């Protein structure tokens, strides 16, 4: 039976409150009177004698409680059970019953003095309260007395021995009377089995549920890991596919670019070969003409070349020019929050002369308090910004800025120096030098000396002196003498080329005198002067000398070649393109376009359309007067 309920001769009682106090006092484990419902069989590994001693002491206490008048009265009532509150009287009775056991007496005295045990509630279960108890009250009382005596015999083995009596006359002792079976114990055992089975079932169900939960968690985790692995594999496959696709696209693009580059190079080579062939044919033609023509005929050719050439511009001054109205258009075009109205800017700047554009810049600052070129720089980008800002300068200022830019920083852009210094007239050179000094506080000649050296430096400094005769008269005999000196300094000089002779003649003779000299040289050397310069002179000096010769023979052809070189093949030399278009569109762009078409078989506008894009292309085509050019 559960240790929280005990039988006495009056019935079964159990504590209903403060069970732990009683168990503590009895020096027993909490299960003796606790809620745990632990069976005596579960304590087999503990000290059995100690358990019996505690149980005996507990029964003494409970028996004392049941002998109280109130307890007896409650047993006579028809109620199946009653709750009894015991106090000091119970503990005093228990002390009296345990006078022979000092340890018990000491424990009960402690309980008597401890206020926690003064109002202990006990629940009385009578035999009538349980239908399974079929024994009468006398049997129950006898059974309780036997159990009490058995416990006493365990605690006091000497007294138990003394009470044993030998049977008289040597007769055998009577066989012990079999103890009656306590149906309540059987019922309790059955209840115990049921409880154990129930607990086992609950534990099994709990274990099964836990196992199922763990299995589900494990399955979920495995599924999640599998999904993550699959997602990772898919991501890796997708990444590889994208990488392969990008690689294929990149390879295809590179292949297309290589093919385009190869094709462009092939076309450029063919065009260059054709141009070279034409130049060679022209050189040969000039040599043959010089050899076959009479002196009178040659003089006539020189005189014709000295006559004023037609120079036709593609950009003219506006006949309805209104600088204030143009400023309003430009201010409105740049008033947008993001970017600007590029078409409006092109419409104004591409249809005004350099002088008119300078007036617009002055008026813009007066009306708006800001510099026009600074506002254009803020709103525009790239090459379109460059050409719009450059067009606000006058011819001399434009050239001065280009020269400064060519010499800024380490090294120099020799092509720009040659193109400007070797192709401008005396008046133009003097204006450029004055403007350069005003803008940068330094003489142009000093800047050139600082940035160049050798024969190339001497050539540029010689041109900057601006002392070339500009008349149309010439001396045939002097031409023959100069031609002989050039031949002796180059072709017939066994010790190398005397560059100073070439420089002296090319820089100090008028254009008319040099044309006659070139005729005489072709007759003497059986070779054109350009071919000799290419063979005899090197690098920058050669380019400078060729520029002088080609400018003398025809500026449009010279600039057409420079424009072609800036756009041939892949990529574009935008600085050269912008510089020539902006500086020549008001001078001789019509002749330059004609020379370009003659030399390279395609229009200048088609070349620009192929090489340039966007507003930059629109502006260039507007300046050369070819807005309808197609790619």
Image (cartoon, grey):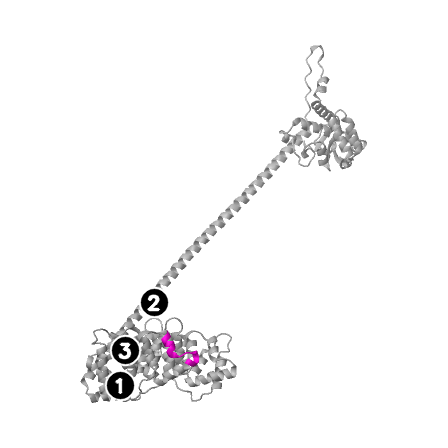
Q: Considering the whole magenta stretch, tell me its main secondary structure.
A: helix
Residue 500, disc: 3
Label 2 sits on a secondary structure element that is helix
Tell me whether circle 1 and circle 3 mark residues in contact (CB < 8 Å). no
Quadrant including the N terminus: top right
Left/right of residue 237 with respect to residue 116 in the rendered view: left
Label 1 sits on a secondary structure element that is helix
Q: How many marks?
A: 3
Image location (x, y in percent) of residue 594: 31, 82
Tag 2 residue: 257
Q: Alpha carbon of mark 1 to alpha carbon of mark 3: how far?
A: 18 Å
Q: Alpha carbon of mark 3 to alpha carbon of mark 2: how far?
A: 47 Å
Observer-side mark, 2 or 1, equals: 1
Tag 1 residue: 513
Image location (x, y in percent) of residue 486: 23, 79
Among numbered discs 3 and 2, the one appearing first in the sequence: 2
Residue drawn at the location 41% of the way across and 80% of the way down: 436
The boundaries of the magenta stretch are 437-450
- Image quarter of residue 307: bottom left
Q: Alpha carbon of mark 2 to alpha carbon of mark 1: how far?
A: 50 Å
Image location (x, y in percent) of residue 463: 33, 81
Residue 447 is covered by the magenta coloring: yes
């Amino acid at each position: 039976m559960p240790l929280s309920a005990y039988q006495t001769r009056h019935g079964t009682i159990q504590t209903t409150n403060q069970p732990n106090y009683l168990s503590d006092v009895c020096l027993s484990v909490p299960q003796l009177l606790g809620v745990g419902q632990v069976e005596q069989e579960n304590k087999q590994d503990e000290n059995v004698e100690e358990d019996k001693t505690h149980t005996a002491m507990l029964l003494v206490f409970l028996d004392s409680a049941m002998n109280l008048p109130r307890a007896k009265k409650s047993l006579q009532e028809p109620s199946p059970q009653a709750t009894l509150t015991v106090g000091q009287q119970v503990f005093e009775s228990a002390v009296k019953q345990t006078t022979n056991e000092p340890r018990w007496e000491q424990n009960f005295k402690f309980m008597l003095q401890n206020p926690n045990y003064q109002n202990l509630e006990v629940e009385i279960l009578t035999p009538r309260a349980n239908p399974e108890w079929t024994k009468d009250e006398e049997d129950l009382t006898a059974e309780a007395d036997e159990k009490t005596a058995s416990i006493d015999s365990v605690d006091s083995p000497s007294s138990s021995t003394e009470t044993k009596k030998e049977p008289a006359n040597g007769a055998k002792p009577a066989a012990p009377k079999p103890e009656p079976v306590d149906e309540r114990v059987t019922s309790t055992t059955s209840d115990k089995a049921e409880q154990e089975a129930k607990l086992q079932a609950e534990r099994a169900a709990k274990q099964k549920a836990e196992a199922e939960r763990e299995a589900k968690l494990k399955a979920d985790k495995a599924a999640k890991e599998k999904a993550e692995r699959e997602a990772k594999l898919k991501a890796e496959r997708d990444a590889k596919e994208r990488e392969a696709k990008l690689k294929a696209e990149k390879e295809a693009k590179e292949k297309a670019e290589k093919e385009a580059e190869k094709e462009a190079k092939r076309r450029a080579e063919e065009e260059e070969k054709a141009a070279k062939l034409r130049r060679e044919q022209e050189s040969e033609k000039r040599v043959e003409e010089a050899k076959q023509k009479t002196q009178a005929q040659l003089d006539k050719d020189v005189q014709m070349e000295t006559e004023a050439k037609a120079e036709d511009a593609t950009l003219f001054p506006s006949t309805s020019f209104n600088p204030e109205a143009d400023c309003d258009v430009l201010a409105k075009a740049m008033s947008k929050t993001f970017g600007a109205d590029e078409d409006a800017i092109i419409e104004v700047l591409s249809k005004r002369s350099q002088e008119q554009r300078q007036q617009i810049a002055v008026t813009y600052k007066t009306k708006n308090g800001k510099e026009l070129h600074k506002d254009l720089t803020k709103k525009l980008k790239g090459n379109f910004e460059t050409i719009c800002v450059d067009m606000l300068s006058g011819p001399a200022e434009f050239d001065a800025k280009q020269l400064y830019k060519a010499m800024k920083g380490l090294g120099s852009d020799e092509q720009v120096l040659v193109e400007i210094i070797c192709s401008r007239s005396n008046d133009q050179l003097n204006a450029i030098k004055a403007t350069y000094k005003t803008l940068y506080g330094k003489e142009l000649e000093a800047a050139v000396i600082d940035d160049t050296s050798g024969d190339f430096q001497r050539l540029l400094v010689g041109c900057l002196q601006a002392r070339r005769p500009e008349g149309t008269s010439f001396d045939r005999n002097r031409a023959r003498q100069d031609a002989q000196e050039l031949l002796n300094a180059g072709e017939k000089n066994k010790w190398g080329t005397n560059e100073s002779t070439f420089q002296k003649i090319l820089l100090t003779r008028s254009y008319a005198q040099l044309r006659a000299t070139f005729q005489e040289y072709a007759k003497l050397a059986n070779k054109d002067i350009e071919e000799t310069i290419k063979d005899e002179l090197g690098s920058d000096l050669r380019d400078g000398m060729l520029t002088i010769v080609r400018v003398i023979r025809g500026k449009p052809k010279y600039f057409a070649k420079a424009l072609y070189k800036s756009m041939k093949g892949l990529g574009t030399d935008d600085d050269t393109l912008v510089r020539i278009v902006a500086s020549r569109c008001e001078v001789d762009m019509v002749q330059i376009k004609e020379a370009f078409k003659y030399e390279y078989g395609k229009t200048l506008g088609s070349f620009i359309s192929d090489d340039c894009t966007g507003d930059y292309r629109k502006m260039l085509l507007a300046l050369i007067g070819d807005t309808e050019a197609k790619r």
